[in-house]
Image (cartoon, rainbow, N blue to C red):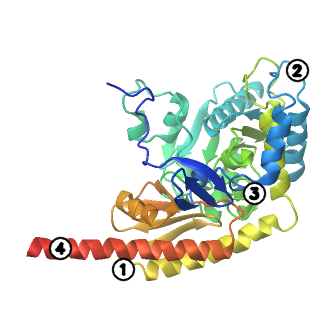
Amino acid sequence: MIASLMPNYNRADLAFEQGQGIWLQTADGRRFMDFGAGIAVSSLGHAHPKLVRTIAEQAGKVMHVSNLYRVPQSEELADLLVQNTFADSVLFCNSGAEANEGMVKMIRRAQYENGHPERTRILCFDGAFHGRTLAMIAAGGNPAYLKGFGPVVEGFDHIPFNNTNTLRDAITPETAGIIVEPIQGESGIKTADIHFMKALSAVCDEFGLYLGFDEVQTGVGRTGKLFAHEWAGITPDVMSVAKGIGGGFPLGAILATEEVAKHMTPGSHGTTFGGNPLACAAGTCVMTEILQPGFIEHIETTGSAFGTMLENVVHNSNGVFDSVRGLGLMRGLHCTLPVGDVLNAVVQQGLLAVTAGDNVLRLVPPLIVTQADCRAACDLLITAAHALTTHKTETKKDCAS
């Protein structure tokens, strides 16, 4: 018989009872260093005192009222985001996929209101991941995620990532805008180079398109800037945010310039839970902590050191890893053995990580991680690699005998 919980996830046989900082602990007392952070979500780590207190205090007052009324907590968080980003206005939602859906709607709506109702198509990139809704699996274009879900939602075109040669030819009179991840996480920690991002901005300006960044995973300090597009020195028209902004509490947001945001008038979009008092209180706590003097600099410095440490891991991994990818505290190790086997070996050493496409082991620790923590994690990665290669050698000997 089928389990009461649908078999939708391939879950590891681990259940965590409590966490503290970068550590998670099971009911039987096993401790794990968490370099997965709930897939880049637990930005302040586990049981962060200020975040715990903020959520508890707000839950004791009011959790939800709906968007039929003013929500002061969402106004406060929106002000904070506007003050520290390119955006003039913010719309809150619940998840990255919902934020990306909202971003597409905003791009199309703005083109429509500006007299271009024919401009509805969104230019996306091979290897993209924008979420699991019907529209967003179409935006991603991954055949594995599209399989079995009927007709593919129309309106999305795809070209190679990091390739400016195909960019201009892909634009048609129906193109409304471009959506891109500064680093493609799901497909293997593939970083958009600065020249490519600048070219996207220039093309959007030239053709009257809107530039949208999916910063669901790269945002809120993850790469060593508050948002990853800042590395290229360009300004998007609209941006999706989620994951780390709530520190573990579900929260998403669409940030936009006035040119885009002004067309989202009453009745044009909606969400029941988005921007409720509890979620926005959590988000304000997270953002306030990350905006503290020195915090972003800490991420940049630690992330750069982590990258250097991972190069040493590659050098000392007996060939299990052959390259390092990513930026800041969003890193990937390309594996020469099946990444599932590598992950199992890493977990056995007490380190949690996440797999990604292209046979990559993804490392996205909480943003509070220290260089000492990173060195300890790298030692565990090397130990896991040696255990894998030793086992492989012993297996070959057993087969030969």
Q: Which residue is mark 1?
A: 318
The reply to whether residue 335 is visible in this rendering is yes
User: Which tag is nearer the camera, tag 3 or tag 4?
Assistant: 4
Q: Tell me, yes or no, whether the two marked residues, 2 and 1, touch with CB atoms within 8 Å.
A: no
User: For the point 68% across and 53% down, which residue is it?
Assistant: 46
Going from N to C along the chain, the mark reached first, 3 or 4, is 3
Q: Residues within 10 Å of mark 1 (few under 14, many from 20)?
A: some
Q: Is residue 90 above or below residue 365?
A: above
Mark 1 element type: loop
Q: Which residue is mark 4?
A: 396
Rendering coords of residue 366 (x, y %): 66, 59
Q: Say whether residue 270 is left or right of residue 194.
A: right
User: For the point 50% across and 27% down, which residue is it?
Assistant: 153
Q: Say whether residue 148 is left or right of residue 330.
A: left
Spatial CA span between label 2 and label 4: 68 Å
Spatial CA span between label 2 and label 3: 35 Å
User: Which disc is residue 234 wearing?
Assistant: 3
Rendering coords of residue 336 (x, y %): 35, 68
Q: Which residue is mark 2?
A: 69
Q: Amino acid at mark 1?
A: Asn
